[in-house]
Image: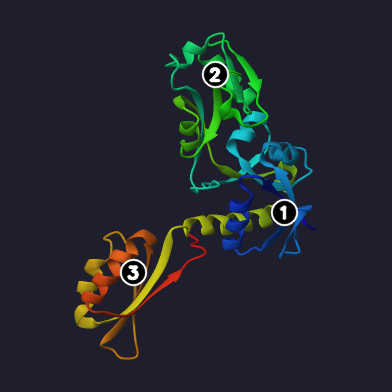
């Protein structure tokens, strides 16, 4: 038996392959094939555009897949949400679909777009958003390069952004957030009821979440004389509880902890000054909670 797994092709592809690598799976992609290799004989991968993933999972062509919450809502797909994976192509965080208009325009709120033209890939969601606000506007599907369409081809756009830099570069300003989205690991309903497939998906979920938990973290271990232990512990962040174990010499202890990578460059010199010795920093692939 094999689990048919959809990997999102496009902007999330590299981040997803890297996440699986951190989780312990090596996925090998090729520009000439839509069927990546994976070093787990019980999984069969297929590259699918994120926009279509939920539909193929709902229809059972795939047992499971990774796609954005935005495209699940857009397609109103009837699937099982297995896990929220808070990562994206740049920041490993959430993304926003925003309503943006030209900086030079007089548009201030969504109500100013009554009777106007809005270009977007997220057509159904945008229509629901406008209806919620009681606004009637023409929503056109955009095949790409949506940011360049205002003011000539559209009055406004609904576009996805992580940093807003592309919108600013095209002299657009954000006037509202339509939808927040993040990647989800989803399953076909029938596949989720299959005991073997469900266990396999739960294992993948645990490993993926462990890989995300480890992002931006490093391990730190050091030796310290018993007399210097309190001074060393005072250097470590208050909320961290390191593991302390005895060495063969009873006067010396080993301290092991996990820290935010961004803080380590400040903490290591202070640990040395406090009496720490043999300080080792090491990368982490997974933290399973």
Q: In the image, is residue 177 above or below residue 9?
A: above
Asked if the residue at tag 3 contacts the one at tag 1, i.e. Cβ–Cβ closer than 8 Å, the answer is no
Name the residue nearer the viewer: 107 or 263. Answer: 107
Give residue 260's quadrant in the image. Answer: bottom left
| Residue at 34% in and 86% down | 247
Q: Which residue is mark 3?
A: 242
Which residue is located at x 50 percent, y 49 percent? Answer: 92
In the image, 95 versus 255, the foreground residue is 95
Residue 147, horizontal then vertical, whole percent: 56, 29
Q: Are marks 2 and 1 in contact (CB under 8 Å)?
A: no
Residue 61 location in percent, x, y? 79, 43
Q: Report which residue position mark 1 lands on.
A: 197
| Separation of marks 2 and 1 at Cα, in angstroms | 50 Å
For marks 1 and 3, the one nearer the N-term is 1
Residue lying at 51% horizontally and 63% vertically, measured from the top left: 286
Q: CA distance from mark 2 to mark 3?
A: 57 Å
Label at residue 132: none
In-image side of 162 versus 74 (left or right): left
Foreground disc of the pair 2, 1: 2
Residue mark closest to the camera, 1 vs 3: 3
- Quarter of the picture containing the N terminus is bottom right
Whichever of labels 2 and 1 marks the residue nearer the N terminus, that label is 2
- Spatial CA span between label 1 and label 3: 37 Å
**Mark 2 — residue?**
151
Across and down, in percent, residue 155 comes to 55, 17
Judging depth in this view, the residue of 154 and 68 nearest the camera is 154
Residue 141 in view of the camera: yes
Provide the secondary structure element on which disc 3 rests: loop
Place of residue 33 in the rendered image (x, y in percent of width and height, measured from the top left)? 79, 53
């Amino acid at each position: 038996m094999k689990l048919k797994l959809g990997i999102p092709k496009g902007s999330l592809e590299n981040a997803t392959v890297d996440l699986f690598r951190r989780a312990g799976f090596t996925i090998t992609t090729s520009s000439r094939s839509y069927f990546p290799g994976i070093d787990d004989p019980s999984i069969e991968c297929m590259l699918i555009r994120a926009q279509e993933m939920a539909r193929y999972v709902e229809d059972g062509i795939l047992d499971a897949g990774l796609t954005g919450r935005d495209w699940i809502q857009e397609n109103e797909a009837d699937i099982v949400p297995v896990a929220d994976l808070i990562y994206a192509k740049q920041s490993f965080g959430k993304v926003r679909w925003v309503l943006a208009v030209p900086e030079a325009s007089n548009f201030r709120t969504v109500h100013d777009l009554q009777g106007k033209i809005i270009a977007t890939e997220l057509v159904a969601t945008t229509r629901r958003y406008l209806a919620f606000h009681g606004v009637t506007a023409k929503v056109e599907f955009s095949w790409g390069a949506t940011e360049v369409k205002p003011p000539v081809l559209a009055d406004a756009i609904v576009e996805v952004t992580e940093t807003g830099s592309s919108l600013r570069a095209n002299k657009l300003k954000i006037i509202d957030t339509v939808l927040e989205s993040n990647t989800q690991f989803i399953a076909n309903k029938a596949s989720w009821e299959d005991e073997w497939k469900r266990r396999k998906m739960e294992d993948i979920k645990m490993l993926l979440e462990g890989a995300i938990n480890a992002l931006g973290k490093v391990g730190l271990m050091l030796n310290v004389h018993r007399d210097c232990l309190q001074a060393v512990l005072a250097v470590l962040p208050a909320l961290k509880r390191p593991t302390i174990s005895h060495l063969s010499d009873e006067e010396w202890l080993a301290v092991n902890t996990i820290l935010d990578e961004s803080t380590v460059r400040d903490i290591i010199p202070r640990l040395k000054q406090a009496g720490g010795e043999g300080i080792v920093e090491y990368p982490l692939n997974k933290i399973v909670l």
